[in-house]
Image (tube, rainbow, N blue to C red):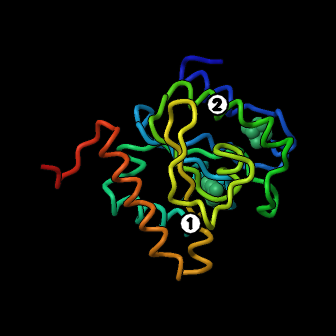
Amino acid sequence: MIDNWIDLENECMKCTKCELCKTRTNVVFGVGNKNAEVFFIGEGPGENEDLQGEPFVGRGGKLLDKMLFSVDLSREKNIYIANIVKCRPPKNRDPKPEEQLACTDWLRNQFAIIKPKIVVCLGRIAAAKIIKPDIKITKEHGIFFEKGGVQMMAMLHPAAVLRDPRKKPEAFRDFQILREKIKEICNYTYSDDE
Ligand code: URA
Ligand code: SF4
């Protein structure tokens, strides 16, 4: 474990632990507030993320930012966002189990430094890796599971919501559920709080 954030990021940026290092443009380490109490975890960088070196910057990212904004959250302010794999799988294929295994040490180390109270997994791949292997995302999104003293929830992946806009209300509802949990266990204050 590396206990210093700068060292961790510098080491990760040089990583060659799996073959995704050969095809990446940028390592997408993560973005946000390192003191955040809420940690969002996606699957892996897509094309835009690979080019810009930041998670969730494409159309899905715009939608994610909108949903975050609806509950007073933002990557600039009060959350951290990273992915299961830090380098883009070619043609956006699912990251292979061995790639996920190679990369999760980085995520685990980020988690150990940030020590979030809440983890939100975006999409099935992240939820299966972090919450439980057999998670049924369509049924179990929006439900909190407790693991090692941390509250964890799966959400629909923003890209899935873009593909099927009828899912938007459910997706926004999950953010309301998140907001209630934040109010209950985090130190964040909301403008409409009593
Ligand atoms: N999808 C993800 O899971 N992560 C990103 O960073 C971008 C798209
Ligand atoms: Fe290293 Fe992860 Fe990139 Fe593989 S995906 S090279 S393990 S940073």
Between 55 and 129, the one lying in front of the other is 129
Of the 4 image quadrants, the one containing the N terminus is: top right
Pointer 2 local density, CA inside 10 Å: few below 14, some 14–19, many at least 20: few
Q: Mark 1 = which residue?
A: 158
Q: Quadrant of ligand 2?
A: top right
Q: Disc number at residue 108?
A: 2
Pointer 1 local density, CA inside 10 Å: few below 14, some 14–19, many at least 20: many
Q: Disc number at residue 184?
A: none
**Relative vertical location of residue 113 with respect to residue 172 in this rendering, above or below:** above
Instruction: Answer left or right for 146 relative to 83.
Output: left
Q: CA distance from mark 2 to mark 1?
A: 23 Å
Percent position of residue 58, x then y: 57, 65
User: Which residue is found at the position 53% from the left and 50% from the top?
Assistant: 153
Queried on whether the Cβ of the residue with tag 1 lies below 8 angstroms from ligand 1, the answer reads yes
Percent position of residue 129, x then y: 71, 45
Percent position of residue 43, x then y: 67, 52
